[in-house]
Amino acid sequence: MVSRPTSRRPATAQTRPGTARPQTSASTRHEASYVVALLEGRGVGREVGLAALDRDTGRVVLVQLSDCQTYVKTLHQMHLHNPCLILVPDTFLSSADASIASRRGSASHATRSLLVDFIREEFPDVPIESVPRKYWNATNGLEFIQQLCVEDEERAGTILAVSNKYYVLSSASALFKHVELRLNTRFASATLRIRCLPVDGTMMIDPESARNLELVGNLSYKKSTHSIFGILNHTYTAMAARLLRVNILSPITGGSARLVYELDIYCDLQHNHLWMHDSTSLKVRTAFAPVCRPTSSFEQEFIKDEDLFDETRKALKALNKMDFDKLIAMLVSSESKPTNTAQGAAARVSQMLNLRNVVHNLPLLRNALEGTRSQLLQIVHNMLSDERLERIDNLIRMSLNEDTSPTKNGIAAVNARVYAVKANYNRLLDVARETYKENVGDIYSLNNMLTEAHDLPLNLVYLDTGFVFSLKKSDLEDQQLPKGFINATLKKGKWQFSSLELKKMNARMKDALDETLILSDKIVQDLVSEILMDIGALYKASEAVALVDMLWSFAHSAISDAQLRRVFIIRPVESWLITAASSVRPEFTGTLAIKSGRHPILETLQSAGTLVPNDVYCDDSFSFQIIQGPNMSGKSTYLRQVGLLTIMAMCGSFVPAEYASFRMHDALLTRLSNDDDLERNLSTFASEMATSAMILGLATPKSLILIDELGRGTSPVEGIGISHAIAEGLIEHKCFVFFAT
């Protein structure tokens, strides 16, 4: 594989911030899991095809786009799908690169493709591997998609959308060939969720803007939750967290219908918290009168909505920390060269137990959403009411025990896998389990015998290698272990040791355990083959759970803390409204108008009432706004606030303001930092000009542009002239611009 060598000094509290371009927050917040294949056309149009496979969830994304000279759109798509490995044709690399990649997995900087150079600069730690050009075949790519795409209502549209896109089909062919030949993974027919993403239906946020606005990660401390993702993420499931991250980095702009539906859900979930009771919010509700329910009989609706909120939370809590997508991907994938080992059998049995728990808990969420008035929630309820889910549940109940629950470690986890399949299902399995049970009983009898013989409180601990004896250090009273005990180690104040007799018993138990797991695995594989016939229902259920979880998280974020809710219950409404910060449902018009808007991240850091709200107004007749003020007056914070509130609204969330109206933007382009870029040999001024050229090249009348102190990297006279020229260019584009001096 080809990778870029890096050497970095460990950061300390005294470390000076790096001057080189750091990794964007979009790429550092979540672990990379996508294998991405890229192919660029040879013409001047810079047509790029991208195929990405999430190794954890089995999700396949196909994108074909026309890019600019700096490949901003391609890098944006790669940040949306964090790459752990990047595949390019061997013709993209120089002959020296290809030979080095085949021998050592590293590469020099000389390449034949400018795209590869930009990828190396943006993703310095991600390996780039070359794939022979013969595997980049559009015909084979279409055959792969037709064979592997799951049978659902979107299959026909996906195949039709990609059928005439040469570059994305060629990328898909190389991607699946690499997965089969190098990763030793093969997918069952009609089991992968393959989607062709429209590029024009989302707002593009370039990686540098995502980093500077702290969308999915904090600039100062990566693990901090002080980011838009951190303040909105109250999700229970990993699928919802991924969906939230993608919506923040690439909000939907194809139409306001889904945003209206999502905001309608907050009316359902938040009536009980009075977010809609100020006069400005009533204007918003009037604007959305066709979909937002009336305000009469609020008290009764408050009781109903409180139940909806709590029941949804309980249903999601039952699915806490479950990754439905990852579970499905494990079920549909298999090894290209099968290996019949007990370790693989144990993993597959555990996956089936997890699937059983997920399918059993889905009716809780379905029942919680029953009777809702929101159209989107009704659609989700119908997705969870799919009869195929009930059929899968019945298949699992016929084969697996319902009283066994998987645990992470210890003998309990082993027993859950051993007794996963019902008794009398397979006679050989029953005999193997009885043998295992007898061997475990012999080990416990040995422990009791040694405890009485040596007068020591011995306990048994199960490790990956089998049972070992455990004894507290204080119980030994500074004496040596009796003779016959071996391999003594001290861990966390406890002695762990074994004996020859125990090792012999562990070996017999391990043989019986392996036989039990292999026999159970055969039953599980037969069960999986039946479930795969209805795999589309599982994908739909996963999407439904992720969407509801994300929307519930939005509602939770817009609600004040539990103490304020208790204050609301015991105090008059007017009293509570004074103490609680308000969030409103935004309108979507042709005007950007915000009354008393607050910076969503700073609001979580400062005490209530200390944050100064700001008003914003921008329309077609006043599209270019100049922000002036002395140093430390908050100009940069104001710019960031405009960008963050726009992203929150386009994600479908409520925004912290008294009134908010937004326009649908196709791109958010910013110049907010003043760092130089040593990796690209760019000074502060050159970096400013490169970013400005990118903004001028991508700006359209529907773009939102934020520029902070342009021209600071050169002399005042030159800076004023350059700023004036760039400002004139942006005015000609008629996009919304906030320009801070």
Image: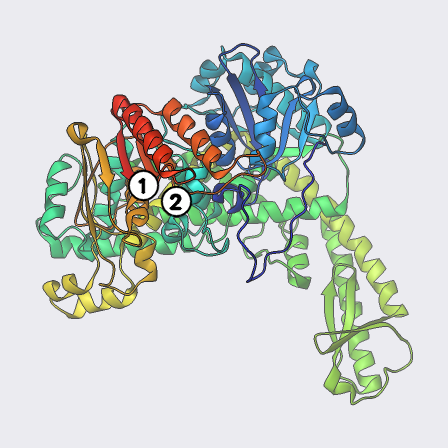
The structure residue drawn at horizontal position 74% and vertical position 63%, both measured from the top left corner, is 463
Residue 609 in the image: state x and y as whole percent. 22, 63
- Cβ–Cβ below 8 Å for labels 1 and 2? yes
Q: Quick one: SS at disc 2?
A: loop
Inspect this view and state whether residue 191 appears. Answer: no
Which dot marks residue 643? 1
Residue type pointed to by label 2: Leu
- Residue on which the image places disc 2: 213
- Observer-nearest of 379 and 16: 16
**Precedes in sequence: disc 1 or disc 2:** 2
Quarter placement of the C terminus: top left
Considering depth in this image, is 556 or 596 the residue closer to the camera? 596
Measured as percent of width and height from the top left, residue 250 is found at 40, 34
Query: Could you tell me residue 691's position as x and y percent?
Result: 43, 32
Give the answer, above or below, for where 485 lies relative to 729: below
In the structure shown, which secondary structural element does the residue marked by tag 1 occupy? helix
Q: Vertical placement of 444 versus 408: above or below? A: below
**Residue nearest the observer in this picture, 28 or 428:** 28
Q: By what rule are the colours in the image chosen? A: rainbow
* Picture quadrant where residue 203 is located: top left
Name which residue type carries label 1: Gly
Q: Nearer the viewer, residue 612 or 544?
A: 612
Residue 399 figure quarter: top right
Q: Quadrant of the N terminus?
A: top right
Q: Residue 477: x, y in percent? A: 78, 90
Left or right: 579 as drawn, with respect to 334: left
* Apparent side of residue 93 relative to residue 80 in the rendered image (left or right): right
